[in-house]
Amino acid sequence: MEEGSVVQTSNLPLVVDLDGTLTPTDTLLESLVRLLKRSPWSVLRLPLWLMRGRAGFKEAIASRVTLDAENIPYCTPLLEYLRAEKSRGREIVLATAAHHTTAQGVARHLGIFDKVLSTHGGNNLKGRAKLQAIQAQVGEAFVYAGDCNADLPIWQQAQAAILVGVAHRTAAQVRREVPIEREYPKQARSMAVWLRALRVHQWIKNLLLFVPLLTTFEFTRMDKLASMALAFAAFSLAASATYIVNDLWDLESDRAHPRKRLRPFASGALPILQGLLVAGIALVSALGLASVVSQGFLGMLVTYLVLTSFYSWVIKEYVLMDVLMLSLLYTIRILAGSVAISAITSSWLLAFSAFIFLSLALVKRCAELVSLKDAGAGATRGRDYRVSDLVVLWPLGVGAALCAVVVFGLFISAPETQARYATPQMLWFVAIGLVYWMARLWIKTSRGEMHDDPVVYALKNRGSRLTVLAMIAAAMAAHFFTWELYP
């Protein structure tokens, strides 16, 4: 953020808002998400709590969950300014509509506030109610730092204003009425930030939908290609919706992770409410596209959504069960592709995908543990994995990869393969490629060079991508061309 100084009011008490000002997030929404994560059935009680009014609603939530002030993001430039002002003896006051337990937690963590004014009992400290509390506890002369038009009554009575991410229209009004001590313009939310939140790069995984189209060699039929294009779009939008919900669900654990703490919602770069709105739009669009493909495909998409939600809310916290569920979610994409083009899925293909995706899921967990080990941590947060588990996970993951190669070898010798391929023996080149490809992924993991998602890494890394293309080319040659491999 940029900052500029227009007037000097350094001797006046500085009163600071919390939500949207000192922190870019909404502490009430974060507390609500945490409550629903711990007690999903609490959603049925929300209407009753809302009937108590805003202060009563906040009291009901705060009595059940406590927000960790150490983990929430803060506006770094403003916080640095507050600390500098505090160091030279200026009175700093926190005045917020957040519940007093949240406000007191932030005050204890930061250690810069002389007074804390917050929602307590039946008094929701917002707007004019906050102004009255400030005038009663601080006095008539003060400087106020806020972020939205709800703070206008306070700014109008203040001797100066600090604007933090204020909308242009509101900021212009404040500038006309009071002097500006500091201004921290709102950071524009670029499309790149939303693309990160939607995890568009993860859409690569939905190319698995096209596997049945390739294995049945019907990729020249335009009607099949059109159905697969719609299916890909539906799965991608549905996956993005689940990614957003999952990121909101995992705010606490993501902020404790060395890389995930930089995600848009964990860092506060995107607001929670907008995330929920975008997720809802993506989900409705996905279901609409899926219904156009077929009712059977719509059923597969709904099944995927149910399983991935179950994974996010329950299974991911249990060691090994989470990787088994991940391998199932990958395999479901292949099944969904078969349903989209009305093709019969080979049992060999399903067995192969179960083993290879189990290995890839274990790559993902081992990569996280290697990263934590390098950072000096001993265990993951929000998942039941420890760095010491690597001695078990390494051989389990490599063994699953070798099982996938064995299944592929049996597939080569199967009668249906001998009948479908012109030169089935050439598929052994694919088997050799699989051994090299999987071994390379595990070596990269052991070196700490693996991406958070191995499927994305496998398709974006040049060496891995070339290996995959070579295996596809060998499979195509085995199907279409007759080769005299034996004299």
Image (cartoon, rainbow, N blue to C red):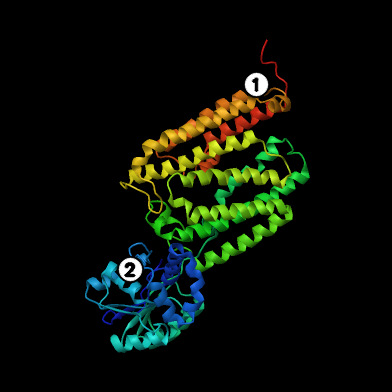
- Left or right: 369 in relation to 321: left
Residue 254 placed where, x, y %?
41, 56
Q: In which quarter of the image is residue 342?
A: top right
Which quadrant is the N terminus positioned in? bottom left
**Residue at x-position 57% and y-position 62%:** 279
Q: Which of marks 1 and 2 is nearer the N terminus?
A: 2
**Residue at x-position 72% and y-position 41%:** 343
Which quadrant is the C terminus positioned in? top right
Residue 449 placed where, x, y %?
43, 39
Q: Is residue 199 visible?
A: no
What crowding class fits label 1: few (fewer than 14 Cα within 10 Å), some (14-19), or many (20 or more)?
Answer: some
* The one of 65 and 372 positioned closer to us in this rendering: 65
The type of residue carrying mark 1 is: Gln
Q: Name the residue under label 1.
A: 425
**Residue at x-position 45% and y-position 56%:** 263
The type of residue carrying mark 2 is: Leu
* The one of 129 and 395 positioned closer to us in this rendering: 395
Question: Given this view, does label 1 or label 2 mark the residue nearer the observer?
Answer: 1
Residue 252 placed where, x, y %?
40, 59
SS at circle 2? helix
**Residue at x-position 51% and y-position 52%:** 311
Residue 370 placed where, x, y %?
38, 42
Q: Is residue 361 above or below residue 472?
A: below
Cβ atoms under marks 1 and 2 closer than 8 Å: no
Q: Can residue 475 be seen in this view?
A: yes
Q: Name the residue under label 2.
A: 79
Q: How far apart are marks 1 and 2 (CA)?
A: 67 Å
SS at circle 1? helix
